[in-house]
Amino acid sequence: MSYTFWIILTGCLVGLTCGIAGSLLVLRKMSMIADAISHTVLLGIVGAFFVTQSLNGIPMLIGAAVVGLLTAYLVELLSNSGVQSDASIGVVFTSLFALGVVLISFIGDQVHLDTKHALMGEIAFVPWDTLQINGESYGPVAVWMLGFSLLFNILLITLFYKQIKMSTFDPQFAALVGIPLTFIHYLLMTMVSFSTVASFNSVGAILVVAMLIVPGATAYLLSDRFLHVIILSGAVGVLSALLGYLCASFFNVSIAGSMATMTGVLFSLAFLFSPKHGIVFKKINSGYEAIKVK
Amino acid sequence: MIRKGLSMLLAIMVFISLAACTNKDVSKDGKKIKVVTTIAQIADIVKNVGGEHVNVISLMGPGTDPHLYNAVQGDIKKLNDADVIFYNGLHLEGQMGEIFEKMQEQKPTIPVAENIPDKYLLSDPSSPSIPDPHVWFDISNWKYAVESVRDNLIALDEANKNSYTKNAANYLTELSELNDYVKKRTKEISEESRVLVTAHDAFNYFGEAYGYEVVGLQGLSTESEYSVSDVQHIVDILVDRDIKGVFVESSVSERSIKAVVEGAKEAGHEVSIGGELYSDAMGEEGTEEGTYFGMFKHNVDTIVDSLK
């Protein structure tokens, strides 16, 4: 009973944290950054191994966070200097990942080091991975990490709401009225890379990548207003987590996989039936138009 | 309006999912110790040592490669209901291992491979602090795992101590016989030709224990890639030492090993693919290869038949 609660809570927190961060990424055409970070963290864990000579989780997490930030900053740097944003993600992603692959061959064939084992968490085991201080147990580590990154995200968005909004929709105007564009960009990238790495460590790659991209894209189909998109995106994330868990327990399948699938299902529904952009309503509307013309 | 509807929906979802989990079905055989293991090789020990007193579930079925394992929703219940959890340890299970360490507070979780004295563990020269976790390919190492299972079952269930001790003794004898069998069959191959070329370096313990030189094409980690010089190096060995067979593994694709066969052919040396070895995974449940003995015997027979 209680372990179910922790898993559902973790799923919802991932949905909210990544949904909110993801809605901003989709608006800025940078959604694939999550996928990039899911690969470049390999460099981080290899680096952590070189430093500590052990396979312990905490150095791996720190290494991953550092490389996550590095990835985000490099992408931002390249796209600010005129490289297309999709291309700059591609360039950073492949080169850092490849560097990780090259370095891994220096640590010897008999060491078992890969991102899936060293960094990626599994949502099914979240309830047992508890935070322990002086022998007291304070609930799952994942809930704490995700809770903090959610707070961090909400705090940043409320503090800099106007600046973020303007720099997203009208960068020229924002620069004109004196908003520090570069600062805002790097701030958002920091937020995204922390949310991503914290979520990776709690629930694994596939769910995080799905939650960062799909809810944002779904919300964008449902509304055009900035605040609504952010809220809807978080809501779609949470709803996917809940439906996904139900589905996983019904079919006895992977929880993360099933939650990620649900984001896809919800997206398809929005794609078909969204009042503004859904193709069903578009068909109906164009039907009306046709009748009117007659 | 929409938001109200949404939150209602959420509340209902949470309620249903919580309610669904409260009706725990009472196990039919309540007296048996419920054991959960990670890999099937350990489940095989527990089945044999525990006998009628235990109920064993392995999270990774016999045919599952532990590197590719993904938890399903039902695994949570299995772990939660277990009286004791046996796992390999030595980082074979990755992060799961760290979670098992933390679960230690709630129930015994035992890394059986960590019962093996450090001096018998192999590690890579460039990273000496990290041992190779594939310990089950050296039968004398695996005996320590059997002892660990025996001692921990006794600690849980003193009443059946005699039964566990007797079963474990039988199992250990069988392991010794298997060990002799492997050594006997190995002698059928000339010393020069005892070279095991395979796609994945899981056989280091096997090589060390039974005198084979193990040449792997790919590192332990699934993320390390093989290089051109690796392929060339292996082709040279095959040609120089006149090795007749190379091997594929049940859990690794055949493609990389085929590159080697093609390379040897170009150098004018005919090599056959000697058959499938079980590395991380075992055979399907219910077949002979689905047990530790069957799996080991299959490997040895396959190796000897194609190398001699």
Image (cartoon, rainbow, N blue to C red):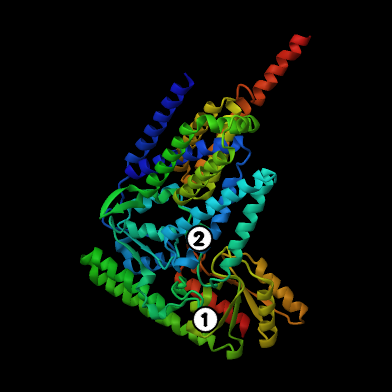
Categorize mark 1 by other alpha carbons within 10 Å: few (<14), some (14-19), many (20+): some
Q: Which amino acid does label 1 sit on?
A: Gly
Which residue is under mark 2? A45
Q: In this view, does A156 lie above or below A254?
A: above
Q: Is residue A173 above or below residue B128?
A: above
Measured Cα–Cα span from mark 2 to mark 1: 30 Å
* Image quarter of residue B224: bottom right
Where does the image place residue A179, in percent across and percent down from the top left?
Answer: 57, 33
Residue that appears at 63% across and 60% down: A98
Which residue is under mark 1? B207
Judge left or right: residue B66 versus residue B195.
left
Q: Nearer the viewer, residue B31 or A286?
A: A286
Q: In which quarter of the image is the C terminus of chain B?
A: bottom right
Q: Mark 2 lies on which chain?
A: A
Q: Find numbered disc 1 in the image and state the secondary structure of the residue it sits on.
A: helix
Residue B198 appears in the picture as rendered: yes
Residue that appears at 46% across and 56% down: A62
Where does the image place residue B243, in percent across and percent down from the top left?
Answer: 66, 84
Outermost left residue? B159
Pointer 2 with pointer 1, Cβ within 8 A:
no
Residue that appears at 33% across and 55% down: B82
Q: Is residue B214 above or below residue B281?
A: below
Judge left or right: residue B45 versus residue A102.
left
